Image: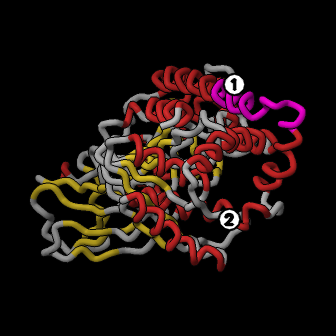
Amino acid sequence: MSKYEKTLALRLLDTLAPWQSAPTWYIAFSGGLDSTVLLHLLKAHSTIPIKAVHIHHGLQTAADAWPAHCQAVCDALGVPLQVIHVQVQPGASLERAAREARYGAFQSLLAAGEVLLTAQHRDDQAETLLFRLLRGAGVRGLAAMPVHRPLGQGSLVRPLLDISRAELLVYAKQHQLSWIEDPSNADAHYARNYLRHQVMPALNARWPQGSASMARAAAHFSEAQELLDELAEQDLARARSESPWPWLPLPSLVMQPLVDLSDRRQRNLLRHWLRPLTQMPDSEHWTGWQNLRDAGHEGRPVWRLAGGELHRVGGRLWWLSGAWLRPVAGSLEWPDQQPALMLPGNGQVLIDGARPAAVLQVRYRQGGEVMQLPNRGHRDLKRLLNEQGVPLFVRDRLPLLYAGERLIAVANLPGLDGRALGEWNFHWQAPTNDQGLS
């Protein structure tokens, strides 16, 4: 083993040290230079069981021959290979669609604790930083590609981010490796290829350490983002509190601790909180947050984002998506022998205790409903909901229980849920944002 190879292997294994106890390392094996070197290095220097995975997108005729090449390489090294065919959805960005299909397949593949290794290197990191800088990305985007992140039940790790493509090429030539040259990588129509073939060579000719410096800058941005996340968690701790409606399975925050912060910290908190829930808007569309925050108390402000809506109700922010953005309507008969009743797009209801001896129906508000209450007489439903402060976005999907034409219970609301009429109460298991039950 040459001193060069030993040094390269030590750098690689040092990066992978935190994942030495993983049951399996999967290698995303395209057959190109980068993943070929990664596979060869790990087979020669690691004791962890490794497997290769080749994703076949079917986007170009030349790609039909690549699984056979990958199989030959893996057979020669004694590494198991799995070929996965994916369907790339058409869209504005073919690169993005292919990436989403690829990582969707990887996510489905990983079992608990398993690790997927990809072969992006230092030059890729520099290109990513420059690409995102030109798109006006913030600190998180300029952190470029993290060394590791969760993926499905396992982890995605990029162990070559501190190694240049030139170093990988030297290793490949020393070991006389063969690899695939993807013809699409030469197509300057794609933004990354343009940067790789037109921009980066010019930058590196003027500043030979340019790629290394940009990769180092990405690491600085990553550290800055970690600090921003820590600050967001501290601010979130003040805004998180138990919801007055524990049966509402929706993300929510108390509004006042949030508005007490500076505008910058408000945006930082919201980015952190909403990031797992939706794609965040660009800078120009943050006026939607300001309008929601500053609306009068009598308003019903909503901030619409790509993945859902943020509502301000009762001194809280509520995140709604999925089933919560689709209206419900109609009435459903509730057969005597059926203990629970599924509500299309709205969870399910059940009765705790002895079921009322009547023909039951579940309905929704239409307006003008009246309910008779012990010792209170007839009361307008709208006023009763106002008394309990029920959030406006809940009211039209809150299940109502009827015996014939008489409203006898409103799900989940103390004093209205039927318990006052007998040894039973009407309970609603509301849908979550992902359309499951709470």
Q: Which residue is mark 2?
A: 182
**Residue 67 location, x and y as percent?**
51, 71
Instruction: Name the residue nearer the viewer: 144 or 64.
Output: 64
Vertical relation: 22 (above or below) 367? above
Instruction: Name the residue nearer the viewer: 98 or 197.
Output: 197
**Which residue appears at 24% of the width and 71% of the height?**
360
Vertical relation: 421 (above or below) 407? above
Vertical relation: 378 (above or below) 9? below
**Residue 26 location, x and y as percent?**
41, 52
Tell me, yes or no, if residue 301 can be seen here.
no
**Residue 106 location, x and y as percent?**
45, 58
Q: Please tell me in which quadrant of the rendered image residue 94 appears.
A: bottom right
Q: Which residue is mark 1?
A: 264
* Camera-nearest label, 2 or 1: 2
**In the image, 299: left or right of 191?**
left
N-terminal label among 2 and 1 = 2
